[in-house]
Amino acid sequence: MMDPTLDYISRYLLEEEIDELSINKDEAALQDIEKPFYEILGQKYPPAPNEQLLTSNKSDLSSSSSSTSTSSNNNMLAESLLVMEYCRGIEEGMKFLPNINKLVANFKENIVSADPSEVKYANSARFKLAEKDDLGMMFPSRSKKYTSDRDLDILEGRNSKISMIDSEEPVGDDVYDEVLLDCGDNRLKGEIWSLRETLQLEASSGVSKKTQGDHHELCTLLIRCSEAVAIYDQQRAQELLNNIRKQSSPSGNGIQRLASVLADALEARLAGDGREYFRRHIAKLVKSPDIYFLKSHHMLIRAAPFTRVYYCFSNGNILNVARNARKVHIIDLGIKFGFQWPSLIQAISKREGGPPKLRITGIGFPEPGFRPAKRVEGVGQRLLEYARSFNVPFEYKGIASQWESIRIEELTINDDEVVIVNCLFGLREVQDETFAIDSPRDQVLKLIRQIKPQIFIQAEANRSYSSFFLVRFQQVLSTYAAIYDIVDSTIPRKDKDGKLLENVYFVPDIINSIACEGSDLKEKPETLKQWQRRNLRACFEQLPVNPDIVKECKKLVRDGYDDRYFIQEDDNWLLQGWKGRVLAGVTAWKPRLDEGC
C-alpha cells in the first residue's frame, strides 16, 4: 500500500495541475468580456496577470478620470463586471451542488452534507464571490494570478461562516498514482535509495566537491559584513559583499548557496529595503504556492526523516489517547496542507469495532491575497474525500485568524469528545513578549489550557533568534549552515526540487530574519529548553515519551536515511538532529488542573 502522506500529496498535485488549466481557460474568457469595457473608457487593456503583477492603484485611476462622463463609465464598468462575476459565481457554484433531494442542511451548526449518514464538511472562513483589485475591477477570488503588493498584507479578523460540499464526481486513484508515485510497497524506500545513489555518482564525478577552507572563509566574510551593515558602513559593507559574491553562487555547494542568500539579505538591509525585498520574495511564492509547497514537501520526506517522525509521534499518541473513544476532535494549530492526517485516517479506519467520528478543526494564519482562508478551505475538502475513501465519519471546520484572537466558543468543544491539540512548528510564528506587553504566545497557551485537551502535542525547532541583529545573524548562519549541509549531503545538486525546497522552506526565513527588523520579523523561535520553561509556567505538565512510539520512530529513521541522522530521548523530548547537533524535538503535554493554576 502506498504511504498515505505520499498518496495525499499525489492527489493534491494532480488537483493543482487541473485547477491551473481551468483557471487559465476561465481567465481567457474573462478577458474577452472585459476588453470592450476598457474600449468604452478609451483605456488600454492591461497585460495578462500572469505576465506582470497588478501595480496600478484605485486612487491612480480616480485621479486620471477628470470628467464626469469618465467617472460614470467607471461606475458602469464596475457594476457590469460585478453582475457578470455574480452570474459566473452562481454557475461555478452549481457544479458542486449535490442532488437537491439528498441535500441536508444544519443551519444551527453551519454544516452541509450530501447525506446525513455520510461524512460532513463545515468551514468557518471569510469568503466572497469576487473581490475588487486596486483598479476597482471585479475579479474571481479563486484566481491565483491577480496579485499586487497590497495583497501581501496579512488580512486580519475572523471570517463569516459558510458551508461547502465537495463534488460527487468520483476520482480515480490510478490517475493520481500516475501523476507522482506508483503503488509499490517500497516506493518511498526506493526513492530514498535513488537519491543516495545519485549523490554517490555526483561525489565520484567531483560535482559535490567542497572544502572546509571554503566554509571557514565564507563564514568569516559574512560575519564581518554583518558587522559593517550593523553600523551602516556603506563602503566597507560593499567591499565585503563583493568578496562574498566572488566566492558564492546560487548553484554552488551548500555554504556557497547560503552565502548567496545571506549576501542578498544583507544588501537589502543596508539599502533600507529589507521589508520590501522580503515582500517581493513572498510575492513570487504567492503566484503558485501550492504546487511549490507540495513538491518541496515531497522532496523533504525523501531526503530527511524529520517530518515522518513528527507524524509518527503525534499520530501514535493520538491513537493511544483515543483508543476507546467514539468521537475524536483534533484541533490542529497550523494545519497548512494537512499532510499529517491521511495516515491517521487510514489507521483509525482499521480500528476494531469501527472507526470513531473524527472532527478536525484546522487553524491557520490568514493567507496573503483575496482569499485569506483559501488554504484551510482546500484542506477540508481534500481530507473529506480521503475520509470517505476509508469510510471514516468526518467533519471539518477551518479557521483563518491570528491565533491569539481565537475564542474558545469558536472551537465548539463537546463534552462527549476526546479532544487533542496538535501544533507542529506553528507557535514560533506567534509573537512573543518582545513586541507585545501581553504576549500573544502566552495567550495561545492560555487558550489551549481552556480547551482542556487530553493531550497537547508540540514540535519545535531547537533554535533561538535574538532581538539584536549581530547576535541573530550568527544564530541564523549557524542554523542554516547545518541545514544546507543536510541538503548538500542528501539531495543531488542538479535536482530541481532540491532548489525548490530551499526557496520554499529556508530562503523566506533567512531573508526575513536578516533583512527585516522589529515587528516585521515573522518568526521568533525558541530553544527546546525555553519552550519547556514557558509551557511549565503556563501550567502544563510534560508527559513521558512512549517507548513503543519511540521504537517505531527509530525504525523510520533506519529505513534508508543517511546514517548521520540521529534520534534520541532526553528530558521527555524526542530529539532529532544531524551529525550530533540537535535540530528539533517533539513532546506531549497535558494541562494542570490544580488550584495553583
Image (cartoon, helix red, strand yellow):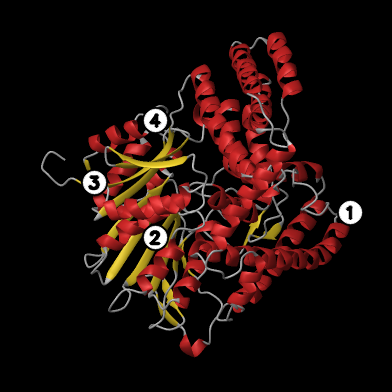
Residue linked to disc 2: 361
Residues marked 4 and 1 touching at CB (< 8 Å): no
Query: What amino acid is found at the position of numbered circle 1 in the picture?
Result: Gly
Q: Alpha-carbon neighbours of circle 3 within 10 Å: few (<14), some, or many (≥20)?
A: some
Q: Distance between the residues labelled 4 and 3?
A: 33 Å
Question: Which residue is rendered at x = 58% and y = 38% of the image?
Answer: 506
Query: What amino acid is found at the position of numbered circle 4 in the picture?
Result: Ala
Tell me residue 3's x, y (percent): 50, 64
Q: Alpha-carbon neighbours of circle 1 within 10 Å: few (<14), some, or many (≥20)?
A: few
Mark 4, secondary structure of its residue: loop
Looking at the image, is 595 positioned above or below residue 15?
above
Residue linked to disc 3: 544
Give the label on residue 336, or none: none
* Whether residue 86 is visible: yes
Residue 516: image quadrant is: top right
Residue linked to disc 1: 42
